[in-house]
Amino acid sequence: MAILFALPRPKVFLIIALSLLSFTLLLHPASPASYSRIYSYVPSKSSGYPPNLPDRIKGGFVNDTLGLGAIPDAGSWEDRRKANATFVVLARNSDLWDIIPSIQQMEDRFNWWAGYDWVFLNDQEFSEEFKKYTQQIVSTTAHYGLISPEEWNQPDWIDENKAAAARDDMFKHVSHSRCIPSSIHTLLLGTILMIFSISCRIERYLWRLRPLPKQYNSGFFYRHPLMMNYRYYWRVEPSVKFYCDIHYDPFLVLKDENKVYGFTLSLYEFTETIPTLWDATKEFMELHPEHIVEGNSMGFLSDDGGKEYNHCHFWSNFEIGDLDFWRGDAYMDYFNFLEAKGGFYYERWGDAPVHSIGAGLFAKKEQVHFFSDIGYYHGPYSHCPTGEAHSAGRCSCKEEDNFDEHWFSCTKKYKAQFPNEKFFGSEA
């Protein structure tokens, strides 16, 4: 470091910029040409899984007086009633050391006793290193799948010049959330701030050149051959945190109560990123009134009965959902309609607002579930259960950091749809 800063300042910044550029390019490799093999790993019986249930579980129940449900006092996963479900991770090889802590926390907080599979999807072949270290940490079967370039890449009919111009214009009006310095950044030395600024400019430049395929999570992941083996999924991303023990099976909540979508965080989308999404949605509703369910969540999506979109959406980096709902006629017709509009490429229609609108219009409001007692973090926001749920889950987060009542949160709008319901862990 001393040698680096002994160099003339322009050379220092050039070296730093080139290093950041090289590192970032490694995070955005090219797509493969076609589907490759699907690889699965199944732990041997001698691997010690599942472990013995901890002493705090007595008589097969955990904190049953709080109504949190039960974990069977069983020696194997086969003895427990389960849903046909899996965790799904969309990751590149370069995400390995960011996804490992996410998996570890999910295993420690829930899956060590629940015993659900993991599906890993990538737009290129997973490396042996990625498979080695993820297999070491999962307690169940791990499947590794390759994403088709036809589903991952931008369609040929998209005008790339128009799309690039639209992305460039968007960045003139919207700051990428990861490139907004927090208060701590403003206290750093000017050199560090300049490095931060350079890295953000590089990230923005690369995003304009090669945007992440928002359409894949919106309309394709649930049709991947590996995912076709399952009915329910739980999405897990790199660099997230699961703060609390989970004493019941969220998949069975969906199955037993006929729910199709579960969330922990909700917030407003930036209006500049989806300027025509609601217009397209209203056009779809006029064309397909048969898909609009009575008693839906329009009250969450709109403050005036559907004339305008209030930009509320469920943050889809945490999703527990019914795959058959996305595969159904209503949502498939909606996705295909949006895909034909080109808004995934000419604007920045993301899977979060698209999934939220789909669940909000094509399901009853009771079928969308707030997992208020599951602690979760995806920077910069946290859902930290409050009150009794915090102690019951042995949560490792600060209750005052809970995002539910923040002005930028839409969770209040969700809860307003159920005025007589109490939300364990989000009582405010």
Image: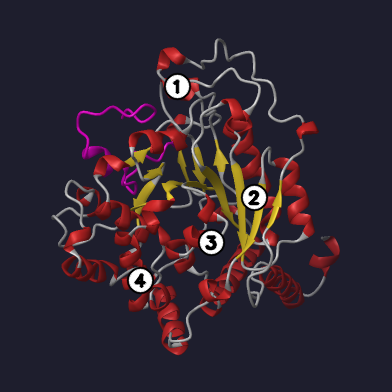
Q: Is residue 256 left or right of residue 119?
A: left
Amino acid tagged 1: Gly
Amino acid tagged 3: His
Q: For the residue labelled by badge 4, is the local secondary structure a helix, a strand or a loop? A: helix
As drawn, 248 above or below 182? above
Task: Estimate the spatial distance between the alpha carbons at disc 1 and disc 2, rounded to whole Å.
Answer: 29 Å
Amino acid tagged 4: Asn
In the rendered image, residue 260, in percent from the top left (x then y), is placed at 36, 45
Q: Is residue 213 left or right of residue 19?
A: left
Residue 278 seen in render: yes
The quarter holding residue 290 reads bottom left
Indicate which label's residue lies in the foreground, 2 or 3: 3
The quarter holding residue 174 reads bottom left
Task: Estimate the spatial distance between the alpha carbons at disc 3 and disc 4, rounded to whole Å.
Answer: 16 Å
| Residue at 29% from the left image edge and 60% from the top image edge | 330
What residue sits right under mark 1 in the picture? 69
Q: Which residues are magenta?
A: 401-428
Indicate which label's residue lies in the foreground, 3 or 1: 3
Residue 412 seen in render: no
What residue sits right under mark 4 in the picture? 336
Q: Are marks 4 and 1 in contact (CB under 8 Å)?
A: no
